[in-house]
């Protein structure tokens, strides 16, 4: 029992806790990525079962979360993709409607011309 070193034992316990925390955080990040959820300090801390303070205070964990959060911000969200599609679709719809209006105007012009001819024929018969 004389070989027991309290400081060494505490260092070992803290190292094990840090490793266990890091493992929990890594697994939580993997689950969030698979679930396609946002990665930030709140979501990772909640998913891993650790405090936000732990996420902020541990440099490795903080760097991982910040890197992944930045990467996610670069990828467009489904809402942004839909908005872009709506803008493109809007342009296509406008072009289609313009063509349809032009066609209907031409058809209207032809029908007016036919009505004038028909009125002229009717007038001649009187």
Image (cartoon, helix red, strand yellow):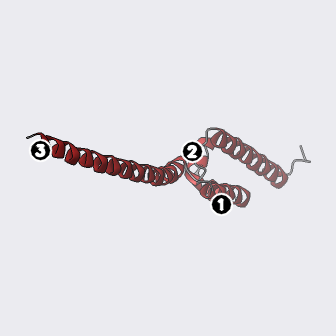
In the rendered view of the protein, which quadrant contains the C terminus? top left
Decide if residue 107 is on the left or right side of residue 20. Answer: left
- Marks 3 and 2: in contact by CB < 8 Å? no
To which residue does mark 1 refer? 57
**How many other residues sit within 10 Å of disc 1, few (<14), some (14-19) or many (≥20)?**
few
Number of other residues with Cα within 10 Å of mark 2, as a class: few under 14, some 14 to 19, many 20 or more: few
Looking at this view, is 104 or 10 the one in front? 104
Residue sitting at x 26%, y 44%: 114
| Dot 1 or dot 2, earlier in sequence | 2
Mark nearer the N terminus (2 vs 3): 2
Please name the residue that numbered disc 3 is placed on: 123
89 and 83: which is toward the camera: 89
Mark pair 1, 3: CA separation = 96 Å
Of circles 1 and 2, which is in front?
2
Q: Are marks 1 and 2 in contact (CB under 8 Å)?
A: no
Task: State which mark lies toward you, 2 or 3.
Answer: 3
In terms of secondary structure, where does tag 2 sit? helix
- Residue drawn at (72%, 45%) of the image: 26
| Image quarter hosting the N terminus | top right
* Front residue of this view, candidates 112 and 91: 112
Which residue appears farthest toward the right when viewing the image?
3
For the residue labelled by badge 3, is the local secondary structure a helix, a strand or a loop? helix
Question: Residue 46 got which mark?
Answer: 2
The earlier-in-sequence mark between 1 and 3 is 1
């Amino acid at each position: 029992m004389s070989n027991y070193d309290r400081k060494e034992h505490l260092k070992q316990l803290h190292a094990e806790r840090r490793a266990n925390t890091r493992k929990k955080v890594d697994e939580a990040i993997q689950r969030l990525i698979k679930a396609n959820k946002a990665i930030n300090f709140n979501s990772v801390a909640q998913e891993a079962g650790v405090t936000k303070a732990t996420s902020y205070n541990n440099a490795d964990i903080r760097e991982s979360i910040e890197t992944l959060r930045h990467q996610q911000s670069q990828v467009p969200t489904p809402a942004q993709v839909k908005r872009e599609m709506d803008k493109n679709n809007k342009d296509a719809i406008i072009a289609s409607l313009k063509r349809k209006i032009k066609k209907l105007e031409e058809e209207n012009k032809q029908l007016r011309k036919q009505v004038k001819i028909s009125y002229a024929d009717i007038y001649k018969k009187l």
